[in-house]
Image (cartoon, rainbow, N blue to C red):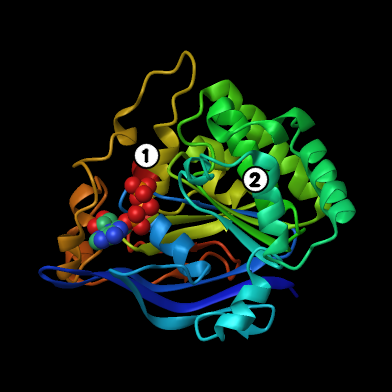
Amino acid sequence: MYNYVLEVNNLNAGYYMETGFAKILKNINFSVQKNIILGIAGESGSGKSTLASSLYNYLKYPGKITGGNIIFNGINILNAKPNDLRKLRGVKYSFIPQAAMNALNPVKKIRFQFYDMMMAHNINNENEQDRKIDEILKLVRLNNNVLDNYPHELSGGMRQRVVIAMALILSPELVILDEPTTGLDVVVEHNILVDIKKIQRSLGMTMIFISHDLSILFEISDEMIMMYSGEIVESGSYDSLLNSPAHPYTYSLEKSIPRIGMKINKESIIKGSTINLSNRENSGCYFYDRCIYAENQCSLAHPELRSINMEHHLYRCFRYPAWKKMT
Ligand SMILES: Nc1ncnc2c1ncn2[C@@H]1O[C@H](COP(=O)(O)OP(=O)(O)OP(=O)(O)O)[C@@H](O)[C@H]1O
């Protein structure tokens, strides 16, 4: 029996546009086990950030959550009272949105940004504040000198470590990170990833780590979800998605991860370019136009998520396992 920290049931969300309401997330269902890193992958426009904000009940107008529930700590956070949400956010779970490192207050020294954060959660004793800051800076491997700096005086990697420290300082059970290392150079990125994983293991917390970069997710995740066009197309253990993907989209993305000395093979090139949400007006598979293994049936009906051997490896493809024989 799994011990779940978060359960997402039939989540639907979208945006009000000039042309009407555009549905983005469609019937998202998943659960997150305790003490793991769940990686959520998908290319730009697949709905990852919309999902991340929804998980924190933080989706702002023109965005709107139109259905479903998200259970955390026994509470459906989508209809929780503002006071209950305040008690959960930052304390029991925290969210590092995309480009959060640019959201640090530019005219305040880091020390006072930490104090503000703790006072917002009623930690007012100065000794306790300083002890917590000291502990967390050690954990994210920052020198205490950063406390007397303004954000612009720090490198991108240091700013990102400050943001991660702020999200962790109250020891939440669950942390949601949306593209936390995007924009950093690869060495800094790698070091931060290694540290994030160490922290997660040592504190026994649960993380949801969102990225468009599959190679990063394979490095860090225990479980993975692949998103395409606002829905889950595959999910399971990192090992099953890496070594036996059941959806052609996962397979193509995985093959397109550059490896030294290897030529790119033709299956790694996904036809077409970005996700076109208007494809979803068709009744078929959303990946149909771009799938080299598609057959007529794929344009006629929309595949449901099915499981492989009753395991928790789920996929949404009519052509599995037949397409595997064509690779
Ligand atoms: N503020 C907004 N207003 C209107 N539509 C939006 C807004 N934000 C996102 N969308 C729409 O929702 C879709 C999914 O966007 P989302 O940012 O969730 O994707 P993503 O997978 O996180 O992509 P990226 O990695 O580029 O941020 C986009 O294609 C876009 O059409």
Mark 2 lies on residue: 164
- Looking at the image, which residue is at 44% across and 82% down? 68
Amino acid type of the residue tagged 2 in the rendering: Ile
Residue 276 in which image quadrant: bottom left
In the structure shown, which secondary structural element does the residue marked by tag 1 occupy? Answer: loop
Residue 180 in which image quadrant: top right
Viewer-nearest of labels 2 and 1?
A: 2
User: Left or right: where does residue 4 sit relative to residue 279?
Assistant: right
Provide residue 141's location: percent of width, then percent of height: 76, 32
In the displayed structure, would residue 92 be above or below residue 35?
below
Mark 1 lies on residue: 327
Residue at the extreme top:
261
Ligand 1 picture quarter: bottom left
Provide residue 36's location: percent of width, then percent of height: 70, 56
In the structure shown, which secondary structural element does the residue marked by tag 2 occupy? Answer: helix
Query: Pointer 2: residues within 10 angstroms few (<14), some, or many (20+)?
Result: many
